[in-house]
Image (cartoon, rainbow, N blue to C red):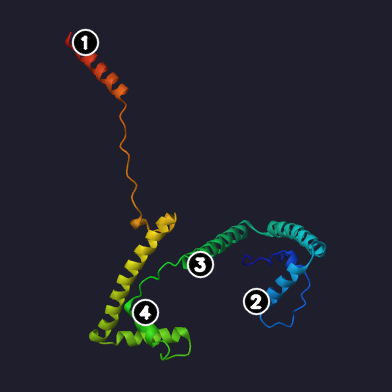
């Protein structure tokens, strides 16, 4: 959707989404989807066919409507639409990457002294919203004496050591399973440069040519 333009056509629905929902009284969306999926799996191919055909027709209609919608947009709106699409794709890619790293057990990054202080005192912090609590904690942190901050500084240093050890073990494991793409650039094993083999024939020809030139000059 672009700023200043009419809303685009609604996306087409899949066959399972078109199938009648017999569990509308469910309160949670996850429960509704789970029940519909279970009902869909129990349908025979003949029972699924009308919904699949309706889904195909809906996709065709969506493409027609989308082309009409695109034709109404100005070049600036099309450019804005393309930029928003790239941003959405980049965000989805980042989310998928984060989930993958979580599944692979990548260690959490070390926390700063203030982050450790904030996690310990967040519940009793002043303020009703998260932003207000963080603001009050920042004020409390700035008012701490040096020896009070030193406790959290030391905890942060210990956390750095923890992260350094864990990330090394994790990256070694990633290298073992062939996922060097997840290893930090500065810790990747450097590929040995193969020394260039000189062409001896060209060298001999070049040397002979130089020698002939010197002999001719001497004569």
Q: Which mark is residue 73?
A: none
CA distance for labels 4 and 1: 81 Å
**Is 178 situated above or below 138?**
above
- Does label 2 or label 4 sit earlier along the sequence? 2
Q: Earlier in the sequence, mark 2 or mark 1?
A: 2
Mark 4 or mark 1, which has the lower sequence index? 4
Q: Secondary structure at mark 1?
A: helix
Earlier sequence position, callout 3 versus callout 2: 2
| Residue denoted by label 1 | 216
* Label 4 Cα neighbours within 10 Å, binned few <14 / some 14-19 / many ≥20: few
**Where does the C terminus fall, quadrant-wise?**
top left
| Residue 157 percent coordinates (x, y) | 28, 74
Q: Which residue is mark 2?
A: 30
Could you tell me which secondary element the residue under label 3 belongs to?
helix
| Residue in the foreground of this view, choosing between 125 and 49 | 49
In space, the residues marked 2 and 1 are separated at their CA atoms by: 92 Å
């Amino acid at each position: 959707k672009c700023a200043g333009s009419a809303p685009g056509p609604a996306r087409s629905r899949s066959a399972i989404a078109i199938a009648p929902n017999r569990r509308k009284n469910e309160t949670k969306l996850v429960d509704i989807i789970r029940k519909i999926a279970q009902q869909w799996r129990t349908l025979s191919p003949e029972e699924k066919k009308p919904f699949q055909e309706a889904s195909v027709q809906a996709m065709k209609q969506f493409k027609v409507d989308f082309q009409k919608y695109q034709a109404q947009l100005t070049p600036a709106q099309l450019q804005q639409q393309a930029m928003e699409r790239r941003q959405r794709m980049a965000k989805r890619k980042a989310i998928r990457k984060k989930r993958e790293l979580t599944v692979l057990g990548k260690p959490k990054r070390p926390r700063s002294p203030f982050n450790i202080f904030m996690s310990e005192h967040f519940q009793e912090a002043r303020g009703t919203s998260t932003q207000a609590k963080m603001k009050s904690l920042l004020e409390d942190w700035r008012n701490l004496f040096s020896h009070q901050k030193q406790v959290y500084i030391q905890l942060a240093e210990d956390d750095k050591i923890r992260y350094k050890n864990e990330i090394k073990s994790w990256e070694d494991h990633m290298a073992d399973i062939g996922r060097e793409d997840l290893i930090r650039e500065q810790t990747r094993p450097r590929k040995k440069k193969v020394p260039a083999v000189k062409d001896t024939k060209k060298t001999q020809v070049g040397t002979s040519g130089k020698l002939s030139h010197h002999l001719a000059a001497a004569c």
